[in-house]
Amino acid sequence: MNIRATLTIYKFEMSRFRRTIFQSLVAPIITTSLYFVVFGAAIGSKIESINGVSYGSFIVPGLIMLYLMTESINNAAFGIYFPKFTGSIFEVLSAPVSALEATIGYVGAAATKSTIIGLMIFFTSNFFCHA
Amino acid sequence: MNNLISVSNLSKSFGSENALSNVSLDIKRGEIFALLGPNGAGKTTLISCICGLTTQTAGNIRINNYDTISNFRETRKLIGLVPQELPFDSFESVYNTCQFSRGLFGMTPNDVYIKEVLKSLSLLEKKDLQIFGLSGGMKRRLLIAKALSHEPKILFLDEPTAGVDVALRKDLWELISNLKKKGVTIILTTHYIEEAEQLADRVGIINSGKLVLVKDKADLMQEFNKKSTIITLRKKMQRLSKELKDSNISLIESGNKIKYISANGESNNLQSILNYLSKEKIDYSEINTVNNSLEDIFLELIEKNEH
């Protein structure tokens, strides 16, 4: 197994994440913050708590999962389809890398990125919602 | 074993279109092999099959005695590929993209080697630049640097000097010659026949997916050795007289010039043409003789193949 190739793809994708930190991380956090403001604070203030859980707190896991899932799919798809679109995928296809190894690299990086985004949204939610 | 690459009865179809038909070819270790052919002849498809970018419909390919499908790891790690287009992740830096290529082949990062390759391609001072900031020629050189980043034993160059200026082309030729000296086997496709004439040890000509011939360049030049003699007349000649009726003699440029082709081993009729001109008091201003170039041979073979 070509573990180094898998790690190379992983690191390459993570470096793209760092390079595009505003689009990758800051933009989802700002968008989610708007959800917290609109649904959590504005609408949530008019809805009663159920068993001590406010509406704002209730939507936090849902919003985290929304971004976790969309970002993980977007990142993995972009990582593979953008090189396919530009033609630079030839490098991966002509390297001694199996489909499984390449998939682990791309999906692993996408999972890491979306987990980081999910955690950042979780921390941000503390500014808007209090359990 | 002297053959590094053996292609046997290779065929590739895209739907009903046959891109390659029953191609068999052996590439010797350490040689520069030039693959020539018109657009759409199947050059890139053949390279793609060997490098694993596309799967053949029939036939097999062995590299260093390993099958390219069942032992793809063994075969691919030997190959460096410079494609025809300039596909890049434009936002990556020159240095990082080379390390990425190296890593894909399972090799540990090697700062010294990558810098050496970049230096040999005059890219070292650009190593921290993002790729979109490079010129077309630099991008072409970067593709070569990426292909060399994992120290391959076989280098495929798919039209490496397309869109490159004359000075850089000469630099690339020198680089290719140096790689050959280091023992790298090079397979080159090109539209510049002059390039093949300059660099190649052997030449393969492909047309409509079929390999028309494979020969040592020197043998090919010898076999198709022809000389063209052009006699520029002072006065236009309407038609060739009966005395000059020969398949190797023709009137060109609206009768202003006589062209005589003397093929290898054929007796030279030049003297009889000159005698005739002198007898008929037809003045001429210039006589030029040129040897047949590889380009002429290529065009002749392609024409024959199409007929």
Image (cartoon, coloured by chain):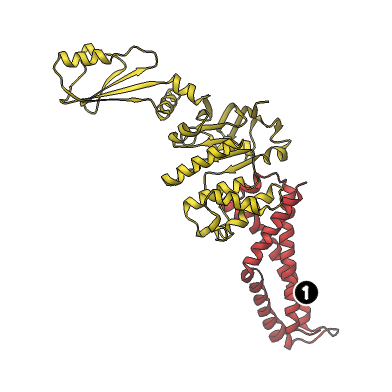
Chain colours: A red, B yellow
Q: Is mark 1 on a helix, strand or loop?
A: helix
Provide residue B76's location: percent of width, then percent of height.
Answer: 67, 40
- Residue at coordinates 58% horizontally, 59% vertically from top-left? B93
Position in image of residue A20 (x %, y %): 62, 67
Is any part of residue B159 visible from this angle? no
**On the picture, is A125 further left or further right than B253?**
right
Is B166 placed above or below A19 here?
above
Instruction: Judge by depth and name the residue closer to the eye, B281 or B214.
Output: B281
- In the figure, residue A117 lies in which quadrant? bottom right
Place residue A126 in its image quadrant. bottom right
Residue at (73% x, 57% y) in the render: A107
Q: Where is residue B192 in the image (x, y as percent from the top left)?
A: 44, 37
Which chain is indicated by disc 1?
A
Q: Residue shown at 53%/29% (left/top)?
A: B201
Q: Pick the residue in front: B18 or B276.
A: B276
Query: In terms of depth relative to the viewer, which is nearer, B137 or B174?
Result: B174
The answer to whether B287 appears left or right of A100 in the picture is: left
Instruction: Assess disc 1: are there few (<14), some (14-19) or many (≥20) residues with their C-alpha within 10 Å of its C-alpha.
Output: few
Front residue of A25/B171: it is B171
Is residue B219 shown left or right of residue B288? right
Task: Pick the quarter of the image with the C terminus of chain B.
Answer: top left
Lateral position of residue B305 relative to residue B58, left or right? left
Q: Quadrant of the N terminus of chain B?
A: top right
Number of numbered discs on residues? 1
Using the rendered image of the protein, determine whether residue B276 is visible from the camera's viewpoint: yes
Q: In which quarter of the image is residue B26?
A: top right
Disc 1 designates what residue? Answer: A61
Q: Decide: is B261 above or below A124.
A: above
Q: What residue type is disc 1 on? A: Pro
